[in-house]
Amino acid sequence: MGGFQQDGPVLGNQYDDDALLRSCLRRLLPAAVLQAIEPDLARFGARVVGDLQAMAVQAEEQPPRLVQYDAWGRRCDRIVLAPGWQALERAAAEEGLVAIGYERRYGEWSRLYQFAKLYLYVPASAIHACPLAMTDGAARLLEVHADAALRGTLLPHLVTRDPAAFWSSGQWMTERSGGSDVGASETVAVRDGARFRLHGDKFFASAITAPVAMTLARIADEAGHTVAGSRGLSLFHVRAWNDDGSPNGLRINRLKDKLGTRALPTAEITLDGIEAWPLGEPGRGVANIATLFNVTRIYNACSAVAYMRRGLALAQDYAHRRHAFGQPLARLPLHLETLAQLQTEFAGCLLLVLHLAVLLGKAETGQASAAEAAVLRLLTPLAKLYTGKVGIAVASEVLESFGGAGYVEDTGIPLLLRQAQVLSIWEGTTNVLALDVLRAIDKEDAFAPFVADIGARLDAVALPALAAEVAQGHAALRALQAHLAHAMQAGEEARQAGARRFAFGLSRSFAAALLLEHAAWAAPSAEGRVLVEIARRWHERPLAELFAADAARLAANRAMALW
Ligand code: MFK
């Protein structure tokens, strides 16, 4: 009689167990700051596998539900949220997950502290990190673009630690007519005294229960005419719900039935004269809301590495518990090789995200040089697009490392893949982000400082054991420079066709420099030996896989793509 019973994976403290995160924080943070924040991270590392995880599981088990009509046939558009989701909302405020970035108790290091904590939170959040991202983006938007009166009234609600006073903010950007192409939006704003009233439909309104939302609309003149294209769009903030819980000038048409992120209420809505207040200069809506989505894109990258780490932690624990062919998986050479490769992918991505958080913190506290500000602008879409793609691949490999069990829902493993899949779509697809990389290069002149930054990091790596990798990094930089120069000559269509590979090359090269820098710093220690090996493995694959972006390539694409 076979009575064998397999144990599932068990997670420990997610801060204590994360050797790479701890080692990065030791290098990046002043000792006094690390000493001050580490107890909070260590406490939180236990909480994310304790009560927060239980809240997330409950929220996933009970997805939000739209009640459109009450028992007497009246339209009510009420959204029923899981108790777990509501508990996460309260806990996120208490933990200061947005607040830390705005209290700025640790000056330029506040963002790094905040993103380290968010990174621990994401896998235990049932994607509640998405409303936090939009709230954080809205807070930054208010800091940069709002007048003092609005900043004074609204901002404190977004950045408070008091759950009773905390408001999350939505971001209603996408319409049926315009997803990536926001400039095709149709919503119209009609003046009504000091405020406006909005009429139109929004097609992906995530966190629809948020009290506030930032949105775009076209201001109509007295004759009802509007300006077409993205230059005709203005930014507004709205209050979506009345005090009695009824929608305030909008209808909820349905909640989306999504592949993942199912605990998050994402709605299709009709704006039916909702009151709206302008924010920033009229006609600058897209440029202004970019302040918001440049923050949410960093959350997206943070979420990608967070899911990678969670997947790895589960796979590592399971490798000790599961035996096959007479041994634990943790002794099977090919299994170890596979996990080592995942560690490599994860490490490069984590370093990108932590560096981004450092730059954001510097920029927001006036500590960033012009070159660092340019690198922040370019690294934001790069980290978002690169980690989004790697996150899906890592989640898929983690799932496979569990064999058939990884394909079965109640192990919780498939959820990692379903959640990861949104990260290459939400806040801009890979291609939209690759084109944003070109925009950053054109408009902010970000390429030269970016290349100089990588070059300087490579030059500072004095470890002979990494000399070949340093040389490889310099060669990749030359190839990327040559590619851009050639693509500029070849014309805009050709440059765009090559933008994705180019962006991947830039991302991989920047991550390579960060990995080498970190390995060289840690080299003498036992941890350093692992980091040197990780840096080397990163270089086993080409840093930049480029092709000649030219007219011949465009012609071949026309022949092949729709063949
Ligand atoms: C987590 C769970 C979620 C649940 C499921 C959700 C599934 C997905 C649902 C969604 O819909 S998520 C929302 C995704 N949408 C986006 O992220 C928008 C994607 N599209 C872009 O980002 C386009 O690039 C963009 C709309 C910005 C293109 O707009 P335009 O107007 O055609 O481009 P243009 O003219 O280059 O830019 C207008 C201005 O914005 C310019 O400034 P100026 O007027 O001063 O010249 C640009 O420089 C500025 N700008 C654009 N992108 C910027 C930026 N500025 C700073 N940073 C940026 N990234």
Image (cartoon, rainbow, N blue to C red):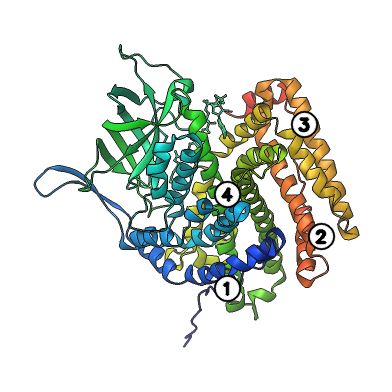
Q: Give the Cα distance between marks 3 and 2.
A: 29 Å
Answer yes or no: is residue 383 visible. yes
Check contact, mark 2 vs mark 1: CB within 8 A.
Answer: no
Most foreground residue, 267 or 37:
37
Q: Position of residue 153 (x, y in %)?
A: 37, 43
Between disc 3 and disc 2, the foreground one is 2
Residue position marked by numbered label 4 in the rendering: 301
Q: Secondary structure at mark 4?
A: helix
Residue 283 drawn at (x, y percent)? 45, 22
Residue topped by disc 3: 483
Cβ atoms at labels 3 and 4 below 8 Å apart: no
Whichever of labels 3 and 4 marks the residue nearer the N terminus, that label is: 4
- 26 left or right of 241? right
Quadrant of res 268: top left
**Do the numbered discs 3 and 2 sit on residues whose CB atoms are within 8 Å?**
no
Asked where in the image residue 465 lies, by quadrant, the reply is bottom right
